[in-house]
Amino acid sequence: MKVGLFGAGGMGNVHARQYGKMQDVQLLVHDRDPERLAEFSARWGATSTPNPEDLYSQCEMIDVCLPTDLHLPYALKAVSNGSAVFVEKPMARTLEECDQLIEAADKAKVPLSVGQVLRFFPEYELGHKLIESGAVGKPATARTRRGGAAPRGREDWFMRHERSGGVLLDLAIHDFDWLRWTLGEVDRVYARSVAALVGSGPDYALTTLSFDSGALGHVEATWMDPSGFRTKFEVAGSAGLIEWDSRREAAIRTHMDGANFLETPLSPTDDPYYRELRSFIDAANAGTAPPVSPQDARMAVSIALAALESAKTGREVRPVRT
């Protein structure tokens, strides 16, 4: 399969590393920065092209790793060409854009999925299975935490919330998706944020989710922790509690220059990003549904946008369901 990758930035490099492990994938890449494009192609052995139309005309699959506000136009063009489409999370900047993309993919009958990669991390995958199997009884409360220092990106686009959606849409969306996948539909959202009203810069947010089941979720997300990236979750129910903390449970962790890095013992094909992309390619080839459906990705955006609206207004907000 020829895969056309838009974007040679942070997530573009993450995805290219995984495609390099797949002998049945030929990678083509486009980026508007010629110097970065040349460096990226040399690093990953990808075929570079300064003309974005080459990717649309030559590739069976398009992977969009661009800033969030650019997801829709690039994905729609791929859909119109009949390509399978994989989009980094979040699916799009607004719910209307999500619905537009899903409708276009449905009409064109092309595979579409989004990088809600948390489902492929072994700790979160096992946590989901344990909770689903009744290991903690009836779930009552869940707490998650995710974050570190603020990302930047080209032109500092992460810090411009009109483009990225801030910490709630760009980062907490991982936990929103995992919690909905694990505990069911979210009825109401209440959030507080340091920077939501400002609309720019680093942010820290706390969000409470009220589920249809009666369970409560508490989601902490931060771009204001200089000590390095950290994630954790805890789910308590009528029969017990499970928890995981990336700092406490890491097999090997390296500390340097105020940051810390997890050294994983997983094999290359156990990497969550590899499994995410491999599962989409396999589903596209087989004509089966991808593990993360477009509707799931849309609902994660809906919850995140409800949290963002709540943080701005101080009121509870109901996510818009399909």
Image (spheres, rainbow, N blue to C red):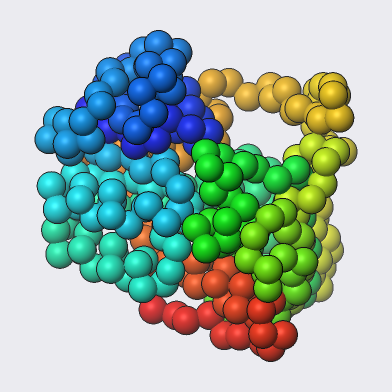
Q: Position of residue 202 (x, y in %)?
A: 72, 54
Q: Position of residue 175 (x, y in %)?
A: 64, 58
282 or 29, which is in the foreground? 29
41 or 32, which is in the foreground? 32
Q: Is residue 237 left or right of residue 318?
A: right
Q: Is residue 32 above or below residue 159?
A: above
Q: Is residue 97 visible?
A: yes
Which residue: 43% across, 30% down?
A: 8
Which residue: 53% across, 33% down?
A: 10
Q: Is residue 213 visible?
A: no
Kindly indicate the quadrant of the structure image that contains residue 150. top right
Q: Is residue 186 left or right of residue 9?
A: right
64 or 82, which is in the foreground? 64
Q: Position of residue 302 (x, y in %)?
A: 50, 72
Kindly indicate the quadrant of the structure image that contains residue 197. bottom right
Q: Is residue 286 above or below residue 44?
A: below
Q: Position of residue 235 (x, y in %)?
A: 77, 62
Which residue: 27% across, 40% down?
A: 62
Q: Is residue 6 above or below residue 135?
A: above
